[in-house]
Amino acid sequence: MKKAAIFLMAVSAAICLIVFALYREDMRRMDNGEPVLFSTWGTEYVPPGESGDALTLRIDIPEDTVTTRGATINIVNDLDYDVMFSEYYALDRYENGMWIRLPAASGEGDWNDMFYVVESGYTAEFRIYWADAYGEIDSGKYRIEKIYTDDYNITDVYKLYGYFEIK
């Protein structure tokens, strides 16, 4: 009887060790975006490329709103978390194969310290009037830069670009 108990304890310990090793390997794979071996361990996990729809954060600029003095931008948040944008923006012009930052006509600009939250699954519309900061812009290809943070780590700042053309 004593030998059977020792044997069952050894088998139980071996099974626990195997499950623990699989758990650690799966967690490493999930962190690297790789398919898992054993289980998702109770997390909502979809390997990249298997969800059908890519999760994105983007700036859409309706063509009919773009003028030499401003535009309407839509920030579309299809991510699984909320993002926060400040009022700040910058404009770049595409010249000779490079993006060149436009100098602000009125210095660095006067931005308020408010943050605008774009919740997961929603779109936020902003009307940008850059004539005050940059003056009227000429025909060409441009991009607008917005900076944002996410609700997981508000100390990290990311950049998002929206592209448009003045004809």
Image: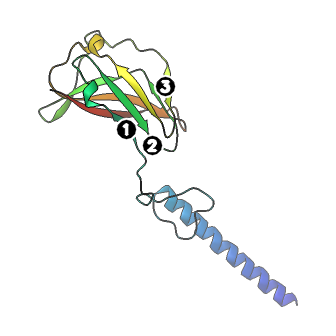
Q: Residues within 10 Å of mark 2 (few under 14, many from 20)?
A: some
Residue picked out by circle 1: 58
Rendered image: mark on residue 78: 2
* Relative depth, front residue between 27 and 52: 52
Question: Could you say which quadrant of the image residue 105 lies in?
Answer: top left
Answer whether residue 163 is visible to the viewer in this image. Answer: yes
Which of the two labelled residues, at mark 3 and mark 2, occupies the earlier sequence position?
2
Q: What amino acid type should be assigned to the residue bearing mark 2?
A: Asp
Which of the two labelled residues, at mark 1 and mark 2, occupies the earlier sequence position?
1
Q: How crowded is mark 1: few (under 14 residues within 10 Å), some or many (20 or more)?
A: some
Image quarter where the N terminus lies is bottom right
Coordinates of residue 2 in the picture (x, y in percent): 87, 88
In the image, taking residue 94 as reference, residue 54 lies left or right, namely: right
Image quarter where the C terminus lies is top left
Question: Could you say which quadrant of the image residue 142 lies in?
Answer: top left
Secondary structure under tag 3 reads: strand
Residue picked out by circle 3: 116
Alpha carbons under labels 1 and 3: distance apart = 15 Å
Q: What amino acid type should be assigned to the residue bearing mark 3?
A: Tyr
Q: Dots 1 and 2: beta carbons under 8 Å? A: yes
* Image point (50%, 56%), residue name: 31
* Image point (29%, 10%), residue name: 132
